[in-house]
Amino acid sequence: MRRTDSGNSLDEALREPILITHHGRPAAYMISPQDMKELQHARVSREQSQPDWAQACAEGWNDFDDKQWFVRRRTLDSVKTAQFDVHRNKGNQKDTNPFVVIIQSARFDAYRRRVVVPLVRRSSVPSAASISKMNHAFNVDGADVVLSPLQMVSVALEHLGPVIASLADVGQSITDAMDELMTRLWG
């Protein structure tokens, strides 16, 4: 998708959606009739399958970032994750943080993102940082890793790698670590 402030982009809009800006801010999209027809069809289909449009928008249905949106949305609808599932990290820090664990409650599964905590290779943890109530150690897929709640982040579903394990059997210790991070007892 190309951004433009020009009004001479009709030919280009027939090939790809164009974001039109006004004073440097998104103002409108120029799209082809075929794209508009697909959007209208998708909206009707979505409204039939998701009667609460306001809730659907809050959950990310209005994320028109590229033409693959329809395919990706259908794919993400079938993605199931569980609290304490361990996923491979597909991000830039996958060498140091090979895995992430989902800490988000299933209560928020309708959202298109998951709150995760990295599992850092134990060899990458500074020796001064001891294994504590907040930094539990685990062995996942043959790798010694440490929970790192201070690096907690929200990740889009499509950026999660495959599920490779579950830490549900030690879920309470992960919850305790998060409580330790959030407690007001220490100021």
Image (spheres, rainbow, N blue to C red):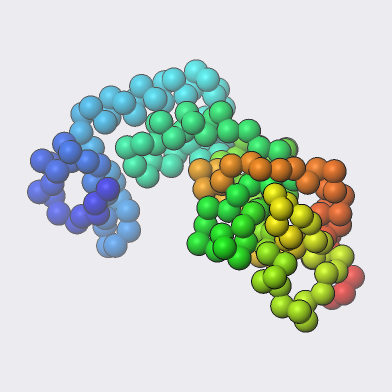
Q: Position of residue 147 (x, y in %)?
A: 75, 61
Q: Is residue 149 visible?
A: no
Q: Position of residue 24 (x, y in %)?
A: 29, 62
Q: Is residue 24 above or below residue 165?
A: below
Q: Is residue 11 visible?
A: yes
Residue closest to the far right: 185
Q: Is residue 131 above or below residue 128?
A: above
Count every numbered label the image shows and give the total: 0
Foreground residue among 42 and 22: 42
Image position of 56 (left or right of 183): left
Foreground residue among 9 and 68: 68
Q: Residue at x 71, y 43 (%)?
A: 165
Q: Residue at x 56, y 46 (%)?
A: 161
Give the image quarter of residue 34: top left
Q: Residue at x 36, y 36 (%)?
A: 68
Image position of 86 (left or right of 155): right
